[in-house]
Image (spheres, rainbow, N blue to C red):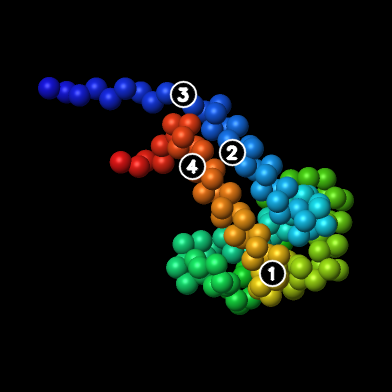
Amino acid sequence: MTTVTPAPADNRRAIVRIVGHEMVRIATAMAPAHNDDIIEYFVFTAIWVLNSQHIIGDERYAPLRSIPPDAQRRPISMEELRRTAPMPDHILTAYVEKMVANGIVERKPAGLVVPSAVFTQPGMVDGANDLYSRMVGMVTAMRNAGFSFGDA
């Protein structure tokens, strides 16, 4: 006898609302570390994500205080940043220049890098904890809305 599994309910709109809500909450929570400027937060995040995307899954850098050293960060070009953070070039360039002047982004011969020391600042550690808590809340809300992560 074949068991028929019912199709899951279409909960895409609910999930989109949950994710959108959390994206706004995360940006709002992280903006104070960037003088209440969520665009700076977004550009800053795009740079460090690109610097470190190759070490996602590296267990050495999974714990909160196991910050990858500068030698592990891959510099990125402005072109890579433009593809990741599409916005008018004059705006993107102005934000990069401001962050370089403020010392939270370094311009190296090979490209832009957020140095490891930036992530040891108390506001950054607090932000990582806050982001983690928000992600746990988002996953919980998504599960409550019927989203399955492939759990058995």
Quadrant where the C terminus lies? top left
Q: Which residue is mark 1?
A: 122
Q: Which residue is mark 2?
A: 19
Closest to the observer: 77 or 113? Answer: 113
Q: What separation in Å lies between label 2 and label 3 (alpha carbons)?
A: 16 Å
**Residue 10, position in %: x, y?**
46, 23
Alpha-carbon distance for marks 3 and 1?
42 Å
Q: Find disc 3 in the rendering and name its residue.
A: 10
Q: Amino acid at mark 4?
A: Thr
The reply to whether discs 4 and 1 touch (Cβ–Cβ < 8 Å) is: no
Q: How many marks?
A: 4
Q: Cβ–Cβ below 8 Å for labels 3 and 1?
A: no
Relative to the observer, which residue lies in front, 6 or 146?
A: 146
Residue 5 in view: yes
Which residue is depicted at the point 70% across and 48% down? Answer: 27
Q: Mark 3: which amino acid?
A: Asp
Residue type at mark 1: give it.
Pro
Mark 3, secondary structure of its residue: loop
